[in-house]
Amino acid sequence: MADVTLYGTPISTYVRTVRMALVEKDVPYDLVEGWPDNPEIAKRQPFGKIPAFRHGDFELYEAFAIARYVDEAFRGPALQPADAKSRARMTQLVSMHSSYCYPTVIGGIVIERVAPKLFNRPADEAKVKNAVPGADKVLGVLEPMISGPYLLGREVTLADLFLYPVMFFLSLMPEGGPLLEKRPGLSKWLQTMGERPSAKASMPPL
């Protein structure tokens, strides 16, 4: 049994972000699979979200807090830039993910496209249609921000680990192809990220 336990369903992009961080840092962990109503998760996350996290007797929730802790508490390649400006840009990108990217792409498009399979209900096509312009704007803002093979240059950071799981799901949706075709930088970044061992090891069930 590993000293680190992550709680949440592997289909969650936030859970995948933390899983990727753990793999990048070469940290062994156990995954307790479940949705927020799982008793083991519910008692660790009072707001009904995932993931939750335990390292020894230290427990934590909120994905950004967990990912930062993983980077700072364990040896391995740094997942946060050393200089203040690049670190601020990383935090900005993570905030953009949470405030604009995730609600539009996952909430507006992906969840509706997987609703028939996961939630046994039809997709809300009006919601998807209304979300596409917002997703297009998010991708348009992200495209010129890419400064290398990764979002912030030559090294992968937490910004990549937060945005990749969302963009991965978008790439599988009918709406994703046309949106990404207009953004060669994002498309290349998505391919580069997909080749990392952390992306392969955290592949969600499809």
Image (cartoon, rainbow, N blue to C red):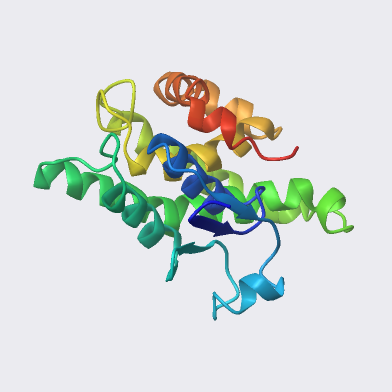
Asked if residue 27 lies left or right of residue 1, the reply is: left
User: Residue, x 48% and y 46% (percent of image)?
Assistant: 17
Based on the displayed image, in which of its 4 quarters is residue 89 positioned? top left
Asked if residue 81 lies left or right of residue 135, the reply is: left
User: Residue, x 70% and y 75% (percent of image)?
Assistant: 39
Q: Position of residue 170 (x, y in %)?
A: 61, 37
User: Residue, x 49% and y 63% (percent of image)?
Assistant: 53
Res. 138 in view: no
User: Residue, x 50% and y 20% (percent of image)?
Assistant: 195
- Depth check: give the residue in front, 110 or 25: 25
Q: Position of residue 191 (x, y in %)?
A: 50, 20
Q: Report the number of discs.
A: 0
Res. 53 in view: yes
- Name the quarter where the C terminus is drawn: top right
- Depth check: give the residue in front, 40 or 119: 40
Q: Against 202, is 134 above or below?
A: below
Q: Against 10, is 119 above or below?
A: below
Based on the displayed image, in which of its 4 quarters is residue 161 positioned? top left
Q: Position of residue 142 (x, y in %)?
A: 37, 37
Q: Against 37, is 163 above or below?
A: above
Residue furthest to the front: 1
Based on the displayed image, in which of its 4 quarters is residue 155 positioned? top left
Q: Position of residue 44 (x, y in %)?
A: 55, 75
Asked if residue 152 lies left or right of residue 127, the reply is: left
